Amino acid sequence: MTPGETLKRYRGKRSQMDVAAALGVHVAAVGQWERGVNTPRRDTAERLDAELGAHGALLEAFGYVSSPVGGTGSLEHRVETLEAELADVWVVLRRVVEVQEIATATVRPDDPAVAAGQQ
């Protein structure tokens, strides 16, 4: 079963508009999730899962958690999630390097004040 089919199953007779309103998203987003055009962000998927009473089935279907026995989450989605998290890590690392460069430029070993403190 695809993530979209799982979503349709749990949505039942509720309209896409009703689900979208409950989540605070545009109705088109719900349609895109059901057609597999897009995937909700994790926080939205968590709210969607809770709203529809899916007990983790939607999180698993969209690849945010896997069941102990194999799991049905999309590998592609997991890779995308990891890539996004890695991009966040790179942002932090770049900032650390910037701070180090500023610190290095501010405190130079050849500075007379620094040299006097080392003696």
Image (cartoon, rainbow, N blue to C red):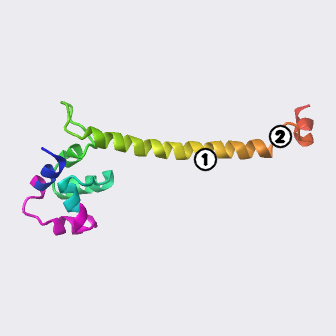
Q: Position of residue 88 (x, y in %)?
A: 48, 46
Instruction: Check disc 1: other Cα within 10 Å, few if <14, some if 14-19, many if 20+.
Output: few
What residue is at 90 percent from the left and 42 percent from the top? 113
Q: Can see residue 50?
A: no
Q: Amino acid at mark 1?
A: Arg
Placement of 20 over or under 88, stated as above or below: below
Question: What segment carries the magenta color?
Answer: 9-29
Placement of 19 over or under 49, stated as above or below: below
> The C terminus lies in which quarter of the figure?
top right
Q: Can see residue 98?
A: yes
Foreground pick, 8 / 116: 8
Instruction: Check disc 2: other Cα within 10 Å, few if <14, some if 14-19, many if 20+.
Output: few
Foreground pick, 103 / 91: 91
Dot 1 falls on a residue whose secondary structure is helix
Q: Position of residue 28 (x, y in %)?
A: 23, 65
Q: Amino acid at mark 2?
A: Arg
Q: Position of residue 31 (x, y in %)?
A: 19, 61
> The N terminus lies in which quarter of the figure?
top left
- Side (left or right) of 115 relative to 84: right
Residue that badge 2 annotates:
108
Q: Would you say residue 26 sits in the magenta stretch?
A: yes
What residue is at 7 percent from the left and 63 percent from the top? 13
Foreground pick, 117 / 40: 40
Residue that badge 1 annotates:
95
In the rendered structure, which disc, 2 or 1, sits on the residue that comes first in sequence?
A: 1
